[in-house]
């Protein structure tokens, strides 16, 4: 059976893998995005699939997931998860934008 320490170890390894990938893309993509102290991330709820990638890449604990009723009647699960940005700790670093697989995160003016 998988133990908690194993999961934490796998999460850390995944975090490292994503970070390396992001760093390789970062310079090119970053130049196109608004960012820095005058910007804050924003999640387009309808595009968020609750995959948790953004919370893995955010170094500033500025993203949390919350439960929401599932909109689709064809899937047999009670709740879905969505991400939300915590404005105060968000530094505008844009990593979450690059890490989101569904392009659900945008940068807006603070
Ligand atoms: S990475 Fe994107 S799709 Fe995944 S939880 Fe975060 S905002 Fe939602
Ligand atoms: S822009 Fe940076 S600090 Fe803000 S939520 Fe995204 S990853 Fe976290």
Image (cartoon, grey):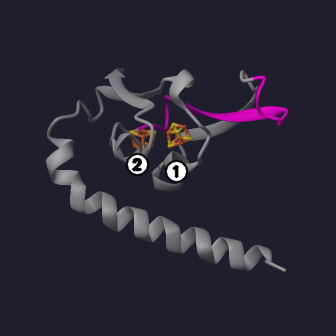
User: Residues in magenta?
Assistant: 73-90
Where on the picture, by quarter, is residue 2? bottom right
Residue 13 percent coordinates (x, y): 51, 74
User: Dot 2, crowdedness within 10 Å: few (<14), some or many (≥20)?
Assistant: many
Between discs 1 and 2, the one toward the N terminus: 1
Q: Which residue sits at x=66%, y=38%?
A: 65
Report the residue marked by disc 2: 99
Report the residue marked by disc 1: 53
Q: Which residue sits at x=72%, y=24%?
A: 72
Q: What element carries label 2?
A: helix
Where on the picture, by quarter, is residue 5? bottom right
User: Is the CB–ligand 1 distance for label 1 below 8 Å?
Assistant: yes
Q: Distance of mark 1 from mark 2, alpha carbons?
A: 6 Å
Q: Which residue sits at x=76%, y=28%?
A: 74
- Whether tag 1 and tag 2 are in contact, CB under 8 A, the answer is yes
Quarter of the figure with the N terminus? bottom right
Quadrant of ligand 2 in image: top left
Q: Does the magenta stretch include residue 76?
A: yes
User: Is the CB–ligand 1 distance for label 2 below 8 Å?
Assistant: yes
Q: Look at the picture and state if 59 lies above or below 83.
A: below
Q: Which of 9 and 62 is in front in this view?
A: 9
Residue 80 percent coordinates (x, y): 73, 34
Q: Nearer the viewer, residue 5 or 44?
A: 44
Q: How many marks?
A: 2
Q: Is residue 15 magenta?
A: no
Residue 36 percent coordinates (x, y): 27, 36
Residue 52 percent coordinates (x, y): 59, 48
């Amino acid at each position: 059976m998988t133990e908690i320490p194993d999961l934490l170890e796998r999460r850390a390894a995944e975090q490292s893998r994503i970070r390396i990938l992001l760093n390789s893309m970062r310079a090119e993509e970053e130049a196109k995005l608004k960012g820095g102290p005058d910007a804050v991330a924003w999640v387009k709820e309808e595009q968020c699939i609750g995959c948790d990638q953004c919370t893995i890449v955010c170094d500033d604990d500025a993203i949390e997931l919350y439960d929401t009723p599932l909109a689709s009647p064809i899937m047999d699960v009670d709740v879905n998860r969505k991400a939300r940005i915590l404005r105060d700790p968000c530094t505008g670093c844009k990593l979450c934008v690059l890490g989101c697989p569904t392009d659900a995160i945008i940068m807006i003016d603070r």
